[in-house]
Amino acid sequence: MNTLSLYVQRNEEVISADSRSLISKRYCTVTSAMNREFWNITSDRQNSIYVGSYGRGTAIDTSDIDILMSLPESYYNQFNSVYGNGQSRLLQAVRQAILVPYPRSEVRADGQVVKINFSDGMFFEILPAFKNWDGSYRYPDTNMGGNWRSTNPKAEQDAMKNKNISSNGLLFDTCKHLRYVRDNYFRSYHLSGIVIDSFVYQAIGNWRWLSSGESSTSAAGTYERILLDCYNQHFMWGAMPLSAPGSNQQVSTDNSRDCLGKVLRYIAD
C-alpha cells in the first residue's frame, strides 16, 4: 500500500458551518416550491437530493450547489410529447415555480438546469429529472433541439464515498484542492467538477492519507507527480476515456482537458 507525501489542506477548501446552514435552508425552500408545483405536497425534503460536487462530498466554498428534483412521470409524458423542444418548456415551468419563493433573485434556464444566482454570490443549479427503474434518472437537455440524457448520481456518490474511506479521506481532499487551484489560479479556463472527481478517482490508485503512527516512505511531492504522470500518459490527448465513478458513464473532457493539465502541473511544481 502506497503512503502519502506531505499535503496540506487549506481553510478555503472547507465549507463553513454557516454556509452549510444557509445551503440547507435554501435547499428546503426550493424543494418545497417544487413539491407544491409538481407534486401538490408541502414537503421541503421529499423528491430532492444534492448532486454534483456537493452531493459527492468534493465541494469547496466557491462551488455551485446542485439539486436534482424528481418529478412525476406524468410530466415526462407531457413535455416529451410537446412538438418543438419540450425540454425547454419543462425548464421554464421549473423556473416559474422557483420564482415564487425567490422573485427578486436572478433565475434562468440554462441547458439542462435552472440556475439561481443569489445576491450573496451563492449559486444553485436545479436539475428536474424522472426516476428510472434502475435508480438512474432522465433529465432534459435543451440543446440541439432538445433531448433526454441519463444520470446516476447515487451510484457516483456511493463509489466516491467508499473510495474516500479506503484512502483515509485523500480522495475528497485531492478533489477539493484541485478545485481550489482552479478557482484561484485558472478561473478564466473551464474545468468541470465531474472531470476533476472522475480523474482523481481513477488516478489515485492505492494512495491514501497516513494513519496515526505511520511514517511516509515517499518523498514530498511524489503523489502530486503521480497524478501529473497519469494525466500525461493517459488523458493529455484524450487517449483514455474518462468514466464517472460508480455509474461508469463516459465523461467528456474536451473542454476541460487543458485546464486539468494546468492545475496538475501547478500542484506538481
Image: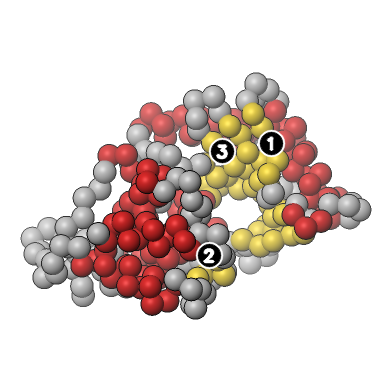
Q: Amino acid at mark 1?
A: Arg
Image spot of residue 62 (x, y percent):
43, 39
Q: Amino acid at mark 2?
A: Thr
- Nearer the observer, disc 2 or disc 1? 2
Q: Crowding at label 2, few (<14), some or many (≥20) Cα neighbours within 10 Å? A: many
Given contact means CB atoms under 8 Å apart, are the residues at marks 1 and 3 in contact? no
The numbered mark at residue 108 is 1
Give the color scheme: rainbow, by chain, secondary structure or one colour.
secondary structure
**227 or 161, which is in the foreground?**
227
Q: Is residue 165 visible?
A: no
Left or right of residue 43, residue 219 in this image: left
Residue at 58% x, 61% y is: 152
**35 or 169, which is in the foreground?**
169
* Quadrant assignment, res 67: top right
Image spot of residue 112 (x, y percent):
68, 50
The numbered mark at residue 124 is 3
Q: CA distance from mark 3 to mark 2?
A: 23 Å
Can you say whether 11 is above or below 85 in the image? Answer: above
Residue at 70% x, 40% y is: 109
Q: SS at mark 1? A: strand
Q: Which residue is mark 2?
A: 253
- Nearer the observer, disc 3 or disc 2? 2
Residue at 74% x, 54% y is: 143
